[in-house]
């Protein structure tokens, strides 16, 4: 049941992302490549590496091991642009990072997940049909983004109105998804919430700490540093759940549990972060 909820949610979120893209935003960001480079490094390489280390450190079972690495491979959370704006960050950088990472992960997710599955999954019967994963990502992620971009330039006013509606729906839809998963798998979630809760919280905290330190190391501006922290910390839970649950890919709802817990904890941690930086500004 849950998969038929997550697939349209993911498609709508990616379509909404396409509606928000502006070509001039890309020009502004590429004029300052360091924040972009640090954020992409954190999203595409650092976070999966941290997830791998934590999965070993917490001795996670194979299905949760792969699920943790999976959520770490899915950057571009739908709410990152809103969080960046609330934190006084660089919204143009946030939008561009979300767009770029959503495209790049079409190629990085199959590579990393193939390796992770071969590492711990195949011995217990978990396999990854790479071709199906690529096809699903193209249909559910790339195509909606391109359609959103097309609508934005063909009908700007209509795109703006649509974005306002979809932007308000994003968080409630994710809450519905989390609720459905909890109802279906509450026994498994409650039985593992201690170790998994600690593990995903550690992943978030280590990721945002490392991204903040790297941003300071290359001396990015305060606005850019806040955006880098949020973009590295926020993951696309809908994408991870779609890959884990899809009958075309892993077809394993339990593998989506780390993504469910991550989506809850990342909002708590990053709301605290937003509160702290706004308090600092005041």
Image: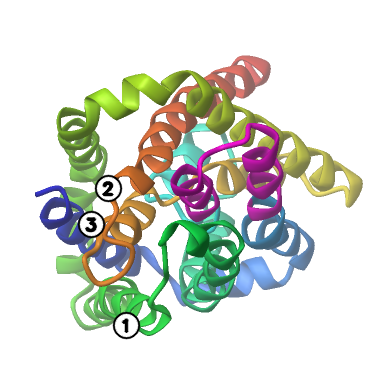
Q: Residues within 10 Å of mark 2 (few under 14, many from 20)?
A: many
Q: Which residues are magenta?
A: 48-71
Q: Horizontal and vertical percent for residue 208?
A: 67, 37
Q: Horizontal and vertical percent for residue 240?
A: 38, 54
Query: Residue at the spot x=61%, y=75% of the render?
Result: 27
Observer-nearest residue: 34 or 269? Answer: 269
Q: Helix, strand or loop at disc 1?
A: helix
Assess whether residue 57 is covered by the magenta stretch: yes
Observer-nearest residue: 115 or 16? Answer: 115
Q: Quadrant of the C terminus?
A: top right
Q: Horizontal and vertical percent for residue 119?
A: 61, 62
- Please say if the residues under marks 3 and 1 sit with CB atoms less than 8 Å apart: no
Which residue is labeled 3 in the image? 163
Left or right: 91 in relation to 162: right
Which residue is labeled 1 in the image? 135
Observer-nearest residue: 48 or 220? Answer: 48
The disc, 3 or 1, on the residue closer to the chain's N-terminal end is: 1
Q: Residue 261 falls in which quadrant of the image?
A: top left
Q: Residues within 10 Å of mark 3 (few under 14, many from 20)?
A: many
Above or below: residue 147 compared with residue 262? below
The total number of labels drawn is 3
Q: Helix, strand or loop at disc 3?
A: helix
Q: Residues within 10 Å of mark 1 (few under 14, many from 20)?
A: some
The disc, 1 or 2, on the residue closer to the chain's N-terminal end is: 1
The label on residue 253 is 2
Query: Residue at the spot x=39%, y=29% of the render?
Result: 264
Q: Horizontal and vertical percent for residue 244?
A: 34, 56
The disc, 2 or 3, on the residue closer to the chain's N-terminal end is: 3
């Amino acid at each position: 049941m849950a998969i038929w909820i997550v697939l349209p949610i993911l498609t709508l979120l990616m379509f909404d992302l396409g509606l928000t893209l502006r070509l001039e935003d890309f020009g502004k960001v590429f004029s300052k490549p360091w924040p972009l480079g640090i954020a992409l490094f954190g999203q595409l390489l650092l976070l999966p590496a941290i997830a791998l280390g934590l999965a070993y450190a917490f001795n996670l079972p194979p299905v949760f091991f792969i699920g943790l690495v999976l959520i770490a491979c899915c950057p571009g959370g739908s709410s990152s642009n809103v969080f960046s704006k609330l934190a006084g960050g660089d919204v143009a950088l946030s939008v561009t990072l979300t767009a770029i990472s959503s495209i790049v992960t079409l190629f990085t997710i199959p590579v990393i997940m193939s390796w992770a599955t071969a590492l711990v999954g195949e011995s217990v019967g978990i396999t990854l049909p790479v071709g199906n994963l690529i096809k699903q990502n193209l249909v559910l992620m790339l195509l909606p983004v391109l359609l959103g971009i097309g609508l934005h330039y063909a009908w700007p006013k209509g795109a703006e109105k649509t974005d306002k509606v979809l932007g308000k729906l994003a968080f409630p839809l994710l809450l519905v998804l989390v609720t459905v998963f909890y109802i279906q798998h509450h026994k498994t979630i409650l039985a593992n919430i201690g170790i998994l809760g600690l593990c995903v919280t550690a992943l978030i905290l280590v990721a945002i700490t490392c991204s903040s330190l790297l941003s300071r190391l290359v001396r990015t501006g305060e606005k850019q540093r806040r955006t880098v922290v949020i973009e590295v910390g926020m993951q696309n839970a809908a994408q991870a759940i779609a890959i884990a649950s899809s009958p075309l890919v892993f077809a394993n709802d339990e593998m989506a549990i780390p993504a469910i817990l991550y989506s809850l904890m990342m909002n708590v941690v990053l709301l605290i972060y937003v509160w702290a930086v706004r308090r600092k500004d005041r």
